[in-house]
Amino acid sequence: MDPECTFRPKTTPYKGSKARLSTAWPFLIAAEYAKREKLKMEQELASLSSCTFTPNAHAQRTPEKPVEEKLAFVQQQMSPNPKRVKVDDVTERLYGDGLLRYELRAKVKRALEDRSVRATCTFTPKINAVTRAMVDHTQYKPIQDRVPEIQRRKKEVLRQLATSVEDKLTFVPEINEKSRQLTQQLGHLSVTDRLVQDAEDNIEKRQIVEELYTTAQGLSFAPQVNERSHSIVDQKPEFKLDFVTRQRVLQDRRDDKLEHQMLLEEKVNAIEKPFQPCIGNAEKVLKHTRPKRLTESTPQQLYRMTYAEPRKKAEQKKRLEEAYYNKFSFQPTLNHVSKALGRATPIQKLAKSDATKPIRSRVIKEMEQRTQAECRFRPALTPLEGDADRATVWNPAHCTIVDCDSNIERARERRRQSLEDKRHLLEFEELQRCTFQPNINRKPISASEAAARPVVVRGLSRFLELKQRAKRQEEELREREAKVFGTSYTPRAYTIPEPFKLSYQDRQRDGKRGRLEAELRQKEMKECTFAPSTMEVKNRKLIQSLLRDDNGVQ
């Protein structure tokens, strides 16, 4: 057996071997008898070969048999035939020769018939190798003896498949010029230097592998990719490209798909809505100038319209302003009087915004009040119970571990009991609102209990309920009649007139309105904190100061 084949199958003996042994015993005896007859026949043929006497049993001489028939007769004599008889005298021998001749004729006849049938019937069925092996019991081998042959056959099939696949691969890679130069440079080095450098490279690679292994060990998450995903990646050609090419191919496919979808929508719209008004060539211009906008998604469009376009407009406006003001090269000069009068605003004052703080705080307060007015939900808070203090449950200064365990258990029991009581109370309140009373089968009541209980008159509660309802309806009817028809009106003899005014002027109301308008106007003006610095204000202040100085001198 091949030493490479380490497979040792476990064979189970056939259960019917004992039964078969009992049936095979007569065949073994018959084979032994045939063997003995064969030996005996050989001895008799050896003794008869020295005898030259040939008796003439018939008047007519029979022709001499050919050599092939003699050999066939000898083989028939030596074969273990159960019809074989002993050859003691001439009569029995001749009778046996006649039987053998008839058998030989029958065999020749069957052989001729088989030859003629084979000549006419040329169909040859193809028998499976497994079936042939099952039929051919003489050449059958158990599985443990056929393992090396099966493995060699499997390797041969795999090798043939690999050879058939590799025949189509005609690609011959080209060696890069840099690789050839590196090979030539390494060839000029000595053997010692090259080996030392290779050892250092191997050590560095081993260190990198160890670092990667430790990093991978530190990561607890290890995803498992499905075999189906691997097969999909192997089947699709775009996944075999590099990242940039694959993204470009996917983008082209996405653009083609979008274009096809747009064409399909246009066809559907043309069928469903044949009317197409003239809207100009804005869409064609956008397609020609801004093709990216046709493929952008909704979030990208919202970001562009919310942030990108306003920013771009502001930058463009700023550039236009700078270009416009750069045309004016005039720089005004201030005299020494203006420089002396003008005061520079300190940085601290510019940094502070005291005027805007009250407005901002007021606006924030109004927004909070509006939010509180909109949110009308007020949750019901349950106050903490007095015995829920957990400071006494675990306090190493006042109790031991055993006492703390018992305190914890007691606190848990109290909490569980309180929750159960609350649950029962809620169930009782819900059952109080429930008016459904099902009829249940109660246990029979004894005579003594029935005599002690009060007599129940069926329908009495319903009668009283209907009576109260009728009484309530009568009261409601009387109230509606008194309200509509005025049955409780007390007539008077005359009408008492009272002074009245069809129109009047409320000065107090007009004053209040004016004050409210002034307050609103003042609030609006408070938000306007911009104070432009102009020459007119400075001139007015200068004139006023000069007038004050003149009045003081007089």
Image: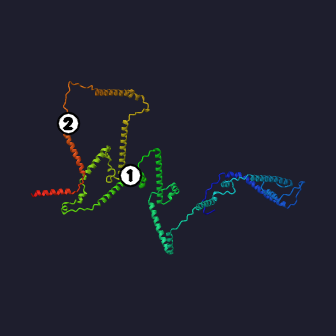
Instruction: Give the x, y percent position of residue 380.
Output: 32, 43
Q: Pointer 2: what residue?
A: 504
Q: Position of residue 502 (x, y in %)?
A: 21, 34
User: Which kind of residue does numbered mark 2 sit on?
Assistant: Tyr
Are the residues flagged by discs 1 and 2 in contact, CB closer than 8 Å? Answer: no
Residue corresponding to mark 1: 302
Where disc 2 sits, the SS reads loop
Mark 2 Cα-neighbour bin, 10 Å: few <14, some 14–19, many ≥20: few
Question: Considering only vertical position in the picture, is 272 above or below 533?
Answer: above
**Residue located 35% across and 47% down the image:** 411
Q: At label 1, which amino acid type do we have? A: Leu
Image position of 444 (left or right of 334)? right
Question: At which x and y percent is residue 418?
Answer: 35, 43
Q: Nearer the viewer, residue 296 or 19?
A: 296
* As drawn, 430 above or below 33: above
Horizontally, is 56 left or right of 152 in the view?
Answer: right
Q: Nearer the viewer, residue 272 or 407?
A: 272
Quadrant position of residue 429: top left
Which of 16 and 436 lies nearest the eye of the viewer?
436
Which secondary structure lies at badge 1? helix
